[in-house]
Amino acid sequence: MKSIDDLDIRLLKLFLVIVDSGGFSAAQYQLNMHQSSISKKMSDLETRLGMTLCQRGRGGFNLTNDGLKVYEASKKLFEHMNDFQDEINDIRNVSSGNIHIGLTDNLATNKNCHIQAAISNFCGKYSKVNINTHIFDTSLIEKKLLENKFDVGITSPEVFKSGLKYTYIFNEQQHLYCTPSHSILGLGRTVTAEDVVAHPVVDRGLAHPVTPLNHVKELSYKSKTTNMEATAHMILSGYFIGYLPEHYAQIWIDRQQLVKIPTTTELEYKPDFYLTFNDKQDQSCAAKALVSAIIDAHNLKTDC
C-alpha cells in the first residue's frame, strides 16, 4: 500500500470494529452488514496491506502477529485523527467573533508589559477576531468584567473583588514627581510623609485608595484623577506633586520638565498588575486563546 486513502480509512475502521466485537459474526450487528460482506472487505484490506491480519474458521477468530500490530497502529491513527478534529473545531470556534479587553492606561512604555507581543501572536493566528480595547481605571474594568461586558482585563487592584480571578503578570516602579521649580525641592533632603502634607497633591483612585498618599492624613489641597494622563497634566502644571510610573515620566525627565522627588521608604510605590477575568463567566474560545497568549508572552505558569 503506497499511501492511505479514504477506502483504507473505512476498511481500517471496519477492522477495529471486528476485533473489538470479537469476530465477524458479532460484528454484523455493529456494522449492519452481512458476514459475507464483512469477510469480503477484510480480504480487501489484507490485499491492500499485503499481509494476513486474522485467522477465521472453525478455530474461531484470532489475530495474527501482524494483525495485532495493525490493530494497535490503527487505534493510534484514529486517536490522532480525533485529536486533529478537536483542534480544527477549536480553530473554527476561535477564528471569528469579538473580544473586549479592558486595560489600565499607560502600560505601553513599561518594559515588563508584553501585552503587545501577546496581541501580535494572537492576531497572527486568529486574524478574523475583532479585538475591542478599552482604557479605564481598575475599578471600572472590574465592574465591566463582573457584568460580563469585558472578556479580559489588565488591572492594578488594591483589593481583590469576589467573583474575579487575578493572575499576577508584571509590576512597575512609580515615584513622586514635581516640576524643577517646585518648592518641595527646596528642602534639600529626603522627603517624608510629613513634608508632603504642606503641598498640594494629585492622587489617583476614586473608588478606593491607590497610592501611599491616600494614607497620609491632613494633606493640603488634593486633586484626584482616574488615569496617568490626567495626573501628568496636573503635575506638569507646576502646582501639584504626584505619582507617575518611571517609564512614563521619563519623557519629561529627559526634557527637564519633571524631577523625581527623593522620598523615604514609606512613600515608595510599586504596584502589581494582574490578568483579570470573571471566574464564573464561560469564556469564548477566542477569549481563552487571548488569555493563553498573554500568559505565554509573560512566561507564566498558571492554571488559568
Image: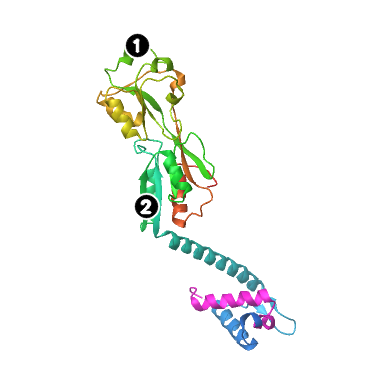
The answer for how far apart the CA atoms under marks 1 and 2 are is 49 Å
Q: Amino acid at mark 2?
A: Ile
Q: Quadrant of residue 176?
A: top left
**Element type where label 1 sits in the image:** helix
Closer to us: 40 or 282: 282
Q: Quadrant of residue 209?
A: top left
Judge whether residue 32 can be spotted in this image: yes
Which residue is under mark 1?
A: 187
Residue closer to the observer: 142 or 287? 142
The kind of secondary structure the magenta stretch mainly shows is: helix
Q: Is residue 297 visible?
A: no
- Do tag 1 and tag 2 residues touch (Cβ < 8 Å)? no
Q: Is 52 contained in the magenta span?
A: no
Image label count: 2
Residue 124, percent from left and from top: 37, 54
The residue where tag 2 is placed is: 131
Q: Amino acid at mark 1?
A: Leu
Rendered image: mark on residue 163: none
Q: Is residue 31 left or right of residue 148?
A: right
Q: Which residue corresponds to the image point at 33% horizontal and 30% vertical from the top-left?
A: 231
**Colour approach in the figure:** rainbow
- The tag earlier along the polypeptide, 1 or 2, is 2
Q: In the figure, is residue 67 to the left or right of 82?
A: right
- Where does the magenta region start and end? 1-28
Give 104 or 57, whichever is nearer the viewer.
104
Does residue 35 sit above or below 242 in this rendering? below
Q: Give residue 276's position: percent from left, percent from top.
A: 47, 44
Mark 2 Cα-neighbour bin, 10 Å: few <14, some 14–19, many ≥20: some
Residue 55 x/y as whole percent: 68, 80
Q: Residue 145's x, y, as percent?
A: 46, 47
